[in-house]
Amino acid sequence: MTGFTPPPPSPDHGTPDGTPDGTRGEHPGLALIPVGEPPQLRADAARNRTRLLEAASRLAARCGAANLTMEAVAAAAGVGKGTVFRRFGDRTGLLLALLDHREQQLQAAFISGPPPLGPGAPAAQRLHAFGPAVIRHERDHHDLILATRTDPLRAYSVPARHLRLTHVAMLLREAGVDGDAELLAHTLLGYLDTTLIHHLSVERGMSPDRLDATWHDLVTRLGAGPAE
């Protein structure tokens, strides 16, 4: 897990050409950002934390993130309940720590992974690739993501959300899309919200292909160009 990196500058505070500071070209200014507050731990404490997370991950896979308890993690890891609380603070802190690794895998893919999702492809192609990648991520981890949302407003203020917003706004600008890039980015990310993806996929039975196709349609209608 990486150390904490301050959130990238807001998309509406950029350089004179409209590109956020430090994010020209292949966006070297973007860096992996944890979902929650990352701990600064000694090596032994880091190993103990990893052991607890591994136990929690196994339990979440077996019983679902919504049913994960601090007591169950402590028992599975062979430690006292107080140890788990001291390491993660509360249940939400534990769930955020579990989500952090998976979120950073997605971040690495769109910041520095292979094209078209990562650098090296035109902005429009990267924007088209971004939606399906996030849809898969939200669908695969929806139970864990939803279990962390104890405060609905917090979903808009966490650094990981800000990173996605900055990234999409940059691609919109580079693709030559007219309008307020920040608000358009918020609109596109609204379509990728975990709750909506879960509702459309599970409650409405919509296929991943249908969700992906609508993302491509939205991006094309904004003027970024069709998917290739």
Image (spheres, helix red, strand yellow):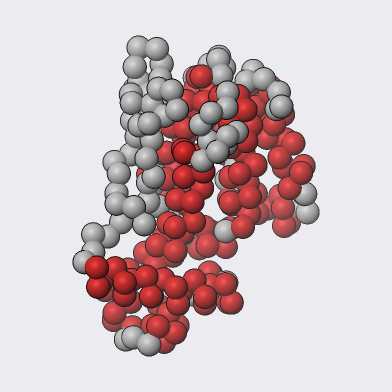
Viewer-proximal residue among 73 and 90: 73
Q: Is residue 89 left or right of residue 111?
A: left
Q: Position of residue 8 (x, y in %)?
A: 34, 34
Q: Residue furthest top?
A: 16
Residue 210 is left or right of residue 131, and the answer is right
Quarter of the image where the N terminus is located: bottom left
Q: Nearer the viewer, residue 6 or 198?
A: 6
From this viewpoint, which residue is outermost toward the left? 42
**39 shown above or below 47:** above
Question: From this viewpoint, is residue 125 visible?
Answer: yes
Q: Where, by quadrant of the figure, is residue 215 drawn?
A: top right
Residue at image coords 68%, 53%: 199
For image coordinates 37% across by 51% down, the residue present is: 34
The residue positioned 42% from the left and 29% from the top of the image is 27
Residue in the image at 43% along x and 23% along y: 25
Q: Position of residue 152 (x, y in %)?
A: 47, 51
Q: Quadrant of the C terminus?
A: top right
Q: Residue 46: image x %, image y %?
A: 29, 68
User: How far from the left and from the top, in percent, is residue 203?
Assistant: 73, 56
Q: Is residue 182 visible?
A: no
Question: What is the number of callouts on the image?
Answer: 0
- Tell me: residue 136, above or below residue 221: below
Which residue is at the front of the view, 120 or 48? Answer: 120
